[in-house]
Amino acid sequence: MSKRTKWDTKGDLDESKNLPIYQHKATLQQAVKDNSFLVVTGETGSGKTTQLPQYLHQAGFWSNGKIGITQPRRVAAITVAQRVSQEMHCSLGREVGYQVRFDDCTTQDTVVKYMTDGCLLREILADPVLSQYSVVILDEAHERSLNTDILLGLLKQTLSSPDKASKGRCVPLKVVVMSATLETDKLSVFLGGCPVFTIPGRTFPVTSKFSCAIGPKDTESSVYVKEVVKVALDVHTSEMAGDILVFLTGQSEIEKACDMLYEKAESIDYRYDVQDHKVEGLLILPLYGSMPTDQQKQIFQPPPPGIRKCVVATNIAATSLTINGIKYIVDSGFVKQLNHNSRVGMDILEVVPISKSEALQRAGRAGRTSAGKCFRIYSPAFWEKCMPEYTVPEIQRTSLTAVILTLKCLGVHDVIRFPYLDRPEERFILEALKQLYQCDAIDRRGKVTRLGELMVEFPLPPGLTRALLQAASLGCEDLLLPVAAMLSVENIFIRPGHPEKQKEADKKHRQLGVQAGSCNDFTMLLSVFEKCKASDAPSAWCKDNYIHWRALKSAFSVETQLREILLRLQKKRDFPMEKFDGNKSELFRRCLCTGYFTNVARRSVGKVFCTMDGHGSMVHIHPSSTLFDQEAQLDWVIFHDLLVTSRIYIRTVCPIRYDWVKDLLPKLHEVDVYELSSVAREEVTDEEVAKWVTKEAAKRQTEGSAEDVF
Ligand code: CDP
Ligand code: MG
């Protein structure tokens, strides 16, 4: 076994010398030495992510501090660290390690550290000059993830003020920004005209073919899933040898497509059905973010001789990960994206058409080592009418709440004039401030409160953190910690494809709900967590109850980590404590209300509820909820999130009493945009604050009973 590993590693090393970046090793090492900021660009697959950190390690940068590399996606951070640790002949977590939310695989020996951009942002909070690092590489900057954009602004601010930058550091920090070709001039200008190092590309032509299967009106997932399966099978039977990469939207669609592919590939008769007689089989591999890492590793291994590999992936395979041997692309034309939905006033994961630049990037994945082909399942009309030119950066389309709180905690009060690479719309900044004010994280002047300082420590959405802290202050964190953990991992309930099994799973899930006593989706999560934890054979218990054991295992680990953060805060600071006399179920739901009062809805007619946040959206309880079909008995509810299809569904729902939110609801409307915008610009004067307070007091008096208002 060890012999084989040795042999593999040698092969890997030889391969790394063939990468386009290899010839520029010395120049790159020198360029980083000579500049505080450097932009490095090159085609995906040229070796930036895996090689540059090693070059800097070889050049001795590690002796002044760690070499940190950020990735927008956790899977990329993990798999690349694995690969690089192999290339550097060390076990993962020693010299080369990774850190992603809730999973830290580093030790004191770690000098090359891959991490998500969110993790580095948290580190900056504790240590603004990043004194532990000699070099920070912001990778995949073209992806324009919210956290990378903020890091860019923060590092620009820090490094451009020499006093700030040198404080607490022996040698100046080096910052390298890596990007796949796009927008490098813009990056360089933003970073004060820093040099751009371009790794000359080596790509082969890719021919792209449109089809007429998906037109401007087809957004139902069943349509594009079926179509990519059909096209992938066509390619398999009618094209010469070479691997296939299918771009789909998310885990469930990918699993569905893989199931269909397995089934259909069974009936292929390789004597007659395939064009290329060297092709004797199909290896189907899914690839998405929450997959176990050992399965992800398989993706990179070459298939056995005669076998064609078909990887069905999310957008992760577009730039973050390069799979060798791909000759054919099947492009669904869609991506799952977090967008701020102004109709409902929340961020929602939606399936949307990709941009044209994204489509070109996807196609390019077929031309790395030889000429390739890209099969688009959409029509030229779809390209023209539905696909935007470029992908809008995340900062301009999602909620900024967590980021604005981080900025405020870092002392950046003027959040409007912060150096954004692309400025978010002012209304999104104001929306974030409003939410922070509503959950008591900032005060009227936009200053972070004690509670805000505690909240920023948790890698959770602000509402959930608020509920958790409320529970902790009432001494019942044991009820909320498991729930917060369960909401932070992927879906724990298995929904089998087979209709009979589906019925059985539904029945088991319902039973779990009933056993949970006061039945709602939050107590259900708590109950599953506790029951499984108490079980002697947890994995068998999960199987029996149609629960994902792997997801629960990560929930256990997340709960422990959240508990550690909480304990640390409780020890360090004067933690707020309150008293409560009431039963446990009420206590639990009241704590939830403190964080989720912004997500409150009241039943209007039949099964329809109306949200109370000013948007007044008409929503339905999602069929996966334990409260589905019991709507008639409900009045007020809170919910964790929304799903928008042809209808708006609320998911993870809990009935509440109006009394519990009565005093909180006015907060939804009391914040004035004008005040907030001066708070955002730090222009608020004492006079203005006084005016604001009196105006509000007057408003409250005239409002009378809040029940009439809502
Ligand atoms: O960052 P960039 O896109 O420029 O390239 P890279 O990710 O460093 O990839 C360089 C090479 O390493 C490619 O040929 C990948 O297929 C390979 N690689 C791998 O085999 N396994 C990984 N986990 C990551 C990269
Ligand atoms: Mg890369």
Image (cartoon, grey):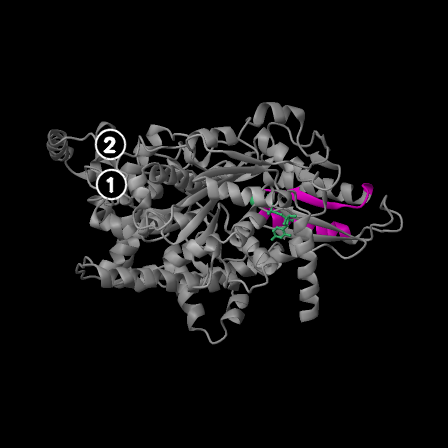
As drawn, 582 above or below 197: below
Label 1 – label 2 distance at C-alpha:
10 Å
Kindly identify which residue carries mark 1: 437
Residue segment shown in magenta: 238-265
Q: Name the residue rendered at 62%, 26% in the picture.
A: 383
The amino acid sitting under disc 2 is Leu
**Residue contact between numbered discs 1 and 2, judged by CB atoms under 8 Å:** yes
Displayed quadrant of residue 410: top left
In this rendered view, identify the residue nearer to me: 135 or 319: 135
Label 1: how many residues lie within 10 Å, few (<14), some (14-19) or many (20+)? many
* Label 1 C-beta lies within 8 Å of the nearest ligand 2 atom: no
Tell me the kind of residue under disc 1. Answer: Tyr
Rendered view: 568 above or below 356: below
SS type, badge 2: helix
Question: For residue 676, which numbered disc appears in the image?
Answer: 2
Q: Position of residue 448 (x, y in %)?
A: 23, 44
